[in-house]
Structure formats: C-alpha cells, structure tokens
Amino acid sequence: MDRDDTGVKHRLKRKDLVKCIFIIFSGEYDKSDVETIWDIEIPVEKLRIHLKEKYGVDYTSNSYIYSQLKHYEEEIGLTLFRFEKRKGNEQNIIVFLNNKMSAFYQHHHLYATHKIKIANGVYGMIQNFKVEAGITRPVNILLGSGTIPYHIAIILRDKSSEENRYSIYTHNLGIIEELHGPGVNHKYFDLHIPAGKINYWINAIIGKDNNLYKSIDFDFIVQSTKYIYEGEVYVDDQEEKERKGIILKECKGVKILTLIKDELIDHPLKDLSPFGAITDYDYLVVPRMSSNVKKKRKYDLMFERYQDLLAPEIVSWNFIIYKVI
C-alpha cells in the first residue's frame, strides 16, 4: 500500500483492491431494488469515491483502477468483471460483476457482506452452544467446501483464544490456506484434513476416503450448496457431491446449511442429482437484508415457499437462524 507524506493512502495491492470492490458491490446490492447482484453497475468514478470514503484510498485515475482490475484477472487466469466504456469518454468506464462465475477464486468474495453476516450468525450459534453446554474442551467443527464456510473459518481463526478453542475439520483448500499460513496463531485451534486429491476448480480435496469425518462426533457440521430446487440441494461437481452427501447423511453432528438465497432456482437441473435436501439439516442460516429495500426479490419469494419447513429461532439485524422442523 502506497502513502504520500501526509499519510494518505493512494494504492492498494491488487488483491485487496479487488476484495474492496466486491464488498462495494455487495453493499450496493443490499440497499438496491434490483433482482440480482449482476444487475448492479457502478462507474469507476463512483468506485473511486467509495474507495476513498470507505477505505481512505485516494485514486486519481479511472483508467488506473481499470488497468489494475484487468491485470489481476490476468494474474489469476479468471474473469471477475465486465466493463463498458461509454461513448464520448474513455474515462467513463462502467463496471459489472461477471455473471458466469463458477471457480472458487472467482466468487469467494462475491456477496462478501452477506457471507460475513452468515458467518457471524454461525459463530453466534457456536458461542451459545459453548455457554449452554458448559464445555471447556475445543469445539469440534466440520467446515465443508464453498465460500461461506471459508468466511466462517476466518472468524473462528481471528476470535480463537484460550476460552475459544476449536478442532476444525475441512477439505476446503481456501480454509486450509487461511489457517496454516505464516503469521497465524495456531495455539488455540487444530486443523484436520481428510485424504484425497485436489480439485483446483472448487478449491477442495475430494475423494472417497471419509473415515476421518465418520470417526468424529462433531458439535457442528456446516455446509453450503450451489443450487436448491424443490427442497433438494445440488452442486455441479460429481466428486464434490459424493463427499457432501456422505457428510450430510453419515456424519454425526448438528448440521447447518448456509444460504445467500441466490442458490434457489425455479427450473430442474439437467444431468444433476441432489446430494440431500433441506430437511436433512437441523438449521438454516441466511443474511438479513436492509430494511430500506421494500421490494421483495425473486429469491426472497422463492424462499418463502419453504416457510412451512422453517421456524425462525434467532432474528438479528444481520442474519436469521431457522430451525428446520
């Protein structure tokens, strides 16, 4: 990060710039009436204002931000954004999120503020459990593949202490990278990893050897999903589906499904079969949207179809925890 003599920040590292811009998109979506986050369009000029107001970073050129985003996409070999240059002004660049994301490193910051809300909800459940059960041992948690468990792991890492110790089991490479790197204080958590091979696209270890998971009595098992159709949960990758299904059906522990709600679809999935159903879980955790948005989105209306299966247990400003009934 570059600063001038007055201490004002002028540049972020590309990775941090991209993360900040994803957070800005998430915030704009949260307070807008558009149907999907893909409908949000933000001029680079407006991004510059947000970056200065929210992060104290003062960029002086629209084209510089544009070039940094393009360079970052080239570095990771994935497309994150769409750009439109409006006629008559080369500096007037409009930014959209790429609506064809599927790889882990494309969407691990997508809906960033929503995922943080969910992660805080799950963290609250863990803390309530510790108090109510009066346990002093480390909490046994299985965090599955996907980007919401990734954000949960970061909160657990950052809030671990002598009073908050964890045994974390995961095949999520994003989580493994966050929990084992230099500078991480490993004193208050253990990290356990199953056998298998690496699937780089979903950034996870996949395989048929799930004996590690089956041998543990977990306090919590946290999963996410790619799609929900007629109450059943799906992912694109067959090997990921097999491991998710075994965890859901054969492992012991309180099972939590975390949802943004954009997982809900209204059409059948060709050539895919479910790894489970909403009713296989004990709880659902979803973000709570801004109260300033009066219009119900398509996803919200689709979610209401499942209200007979769900009983709100905790309603926070930022999240809702449902008991599956």
Image: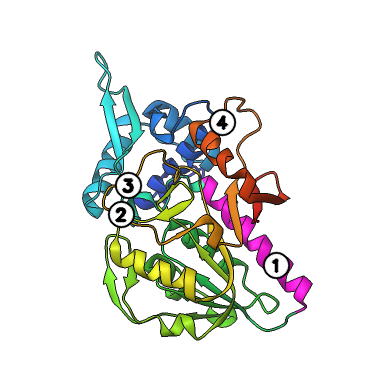
Specify the label residue 269 is tagged with: 3
Write the start and end of the magenta stretch as one range.
113-134
How many C-alpha atoms fall within 10 Å of the one at disc 3: few (<14), some, or many (≥20)? some
In terms of secondary structure, where does tag 2 sit?
loop
| Amino acid type of the residue tagged 3 in the rendering | Leu
In terms of secondary structure, where does tag 3 sit?
loop
At horizontal 31% and vertical 76% (from top left) the residue drawn is 207
Q: Is residue 159 left or right of residue 142?
A: right
Residue 167: image quadrant is bottom right
Instruction: Work out how far the residue at label 3 is from the one at label 2, CA to CA, in angstroms.
Output: 6 Å
How many C-alpha atoms fall within 10 Å of the one at disc 1: few (<14), some, or many (≥20)? some
Instruction: Work out how far the residue at label 1 is from the one at label 2, CA to CA, in angstroms.
Output: 37 Å
| Amino acid type of the residue tagged 4 in the rendering | Lys
Q: CB atoms at circles 1 and 3 under 8 Å apart?
A: no
Main SS of residues in magenta = helix
Q: Tell me if residue 127 is in the magenta stretch.
A: yes
Q: Which residue is mark 4?
A: 31
Q: Which residue is mark 1?
A: 127
At horizontal 55% and vertical 36% (from top left) the residue drawn is 300
Residue 44: image quadrant is top left
Q: CB atoms at circles 3 and 2 under 8 Å apart?
A: yes
| Amino acid type of the residue tagged 1 in the rendering | Gln
